[in-house]
Image: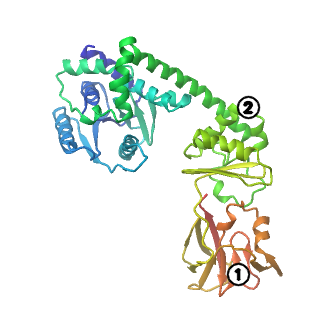
Amino acid sequence: MKTVTLVPHLLETLRAYPATQCFWVAYSGGLDSHVLLHALAQLRSQLNNELRAIHIHHGLHPQADHWATHCQQVCGALAIPCEVIRVNVRIAPRESLEANARTARYDAIAQLLVPDDVVLTAQHADDQAETLLLQLLRGAGVAGLAAMPPVSRLEPGWLVRPLLIYTRAQLHAYAQQAHLHWIEDSSNADTRFERNFLRHEIMPLLQQRWPSVSQIFSRAARHQAEADELVQTLAEEDLHSVASNLQGFKNLEGFENLAGFNNPAQLFLPALARLSPARQRNVLRFWLKKLGLPLPSTVQLQHIFSDILTARVDRQPLVRWHGGEVRRYRNHLFAMPNLPPVPEVSHPLTWTLPQPLRLPLGELTVNEVQGRGIALPAGTELQVRFRQGGETFRWREHQRVVKKLLQSAQFLPWHRPFIPLIYLENTLIAIPSIGIADGLVAQNGEKGWEIQLRLDI
């Protein structure tokens, strides 16, 4: 590949982003990113955008400091500003170090962006082929087999991979013709890592038999991306048909931000049951992704169908995984982040009016009002407890059973253990969203505190 071949292609790619203030090059110092940086440097006179480089210092390699210095020197020679950002990569058993480093890297890059900034990375056709193989070996669906998209969101900007049509050999030829000097990361030869094993052991064998295997796999990934677009379109349509509204649920304040056609927090099971099993699984994955929840495994997804969708209407089944859970109540399916442990009923909390009080699942606050609310002076110390059974509440001239009040107020069953019960000297005087005990409501012209409960749901 002649050195000039890459430059016109990049220019065409970059001109698709006229509103971009800055193009950031994710520059590791290796061959691929050095080629990208050098080619972009040739285009500065033809662009009205700032060009900057960013180097992520992971601190995982003994030569990491040397690499950062090398990148700064290369950028200095090209008159390209270079940001070196140090990140802390989580190292934990049973977690992929590669995946954690990638997450830390992109999180750090996103912090530098302003709206419409573009980050350019140097993944190429061989990287795409390896990604496709890795996803295939993990049993991924069409979304995973689509591998790396050429363009994706990296809030608040964009992540663009302009080199996916080029092979590693083509980039190497460019680097030699341009007399570039790059870093060789010794860890890239360590075949204990899955990607390196594919790169050094499997891909060479495939290339012997099929010399164009990288381009073939990249083409297959593009086909899968098109198929995934159709799958997502169908899922969007199905979600509209099975999305539930909040009618009949009075105390779902925490769900209001999620509810609605764009991000429905619950699904209507009779409507979901009318879809085929494949479309049920598809819309369920799409729904959970729209809610920002991590996706369950295939086994966990199957449990949702076998344990929840088929359960009797009076049951309250639960499927939980790391970062999310799905529950059923009557004919509705709810999804949410993992709830915290149920509060200890033997350890009441002290609440001094009018200070806010953090709860296991939310927060209590008060507003000063006139002629309503709870009539107590500022500085009053209250106790906040959680239901343990048998509580009663003197309200509207009757002694009420708290369990039945919470049911009548239509709190969801899994939220009821988190509803704070407010006591004064061992007497239950208020239940947020339900009422204040007789004799403690502020009268006309009297100052009171209006209690507000926010649940983190």
Q: Which residue is mark 2?
A: 276
Q: Left or right: where does residue 118 sit relative to residue 270? A: left
Picture colour scheme? rainbow
| Residue positioned 29% across, 33% down in the render | 188
Q: Quadrant of residue 201?
A: top left
Of the numbered discs 2 and 1, the one sitting upstream in the chain is: 2
Q: Quadrant of residue 148?
A: top left
Which amino acid type is shown beneath numbered disc 2?
A: Ser
* Vertical relation: 389 (above or below) 126: below
Checking the image for residue 428, the label placed there is 1
Q: Give whichever of 207, 11 is nearer the camera.
A: 207
Q: How far apart, in angstroms, are the residues tagged by discs 2 and 1?
A: 50 Å
| Residue positioned 68% across, 60% down in the render | 414
| Residue positioned 72% across, 59% down in the render | 412
Residue at disc 1, secondary structure: strand
Q: Are marks 2 and 1 in contact (CB under 8 Å)?
A: no
Residue 248 visible in the snapshot = yes
Task: Say which quadrant the C terminus sits in.
Answer: bottom right
Residue at disc 2, secondary structure: loop
Q: Position of residue 227 (x, y in %)?
A: 58, 24
Q: Left or right: where does residue 274 sit relative to residue 10? A: right
Q: Position of residue 180 (x, y in %)?
A: 18, 25
Q: Give whichever of 385, 453 is nearer the camera.
A: 385
Which amino acid type is shown beneath numbered disc 1?
A: Leu
Count of numbered circles in the view: 2
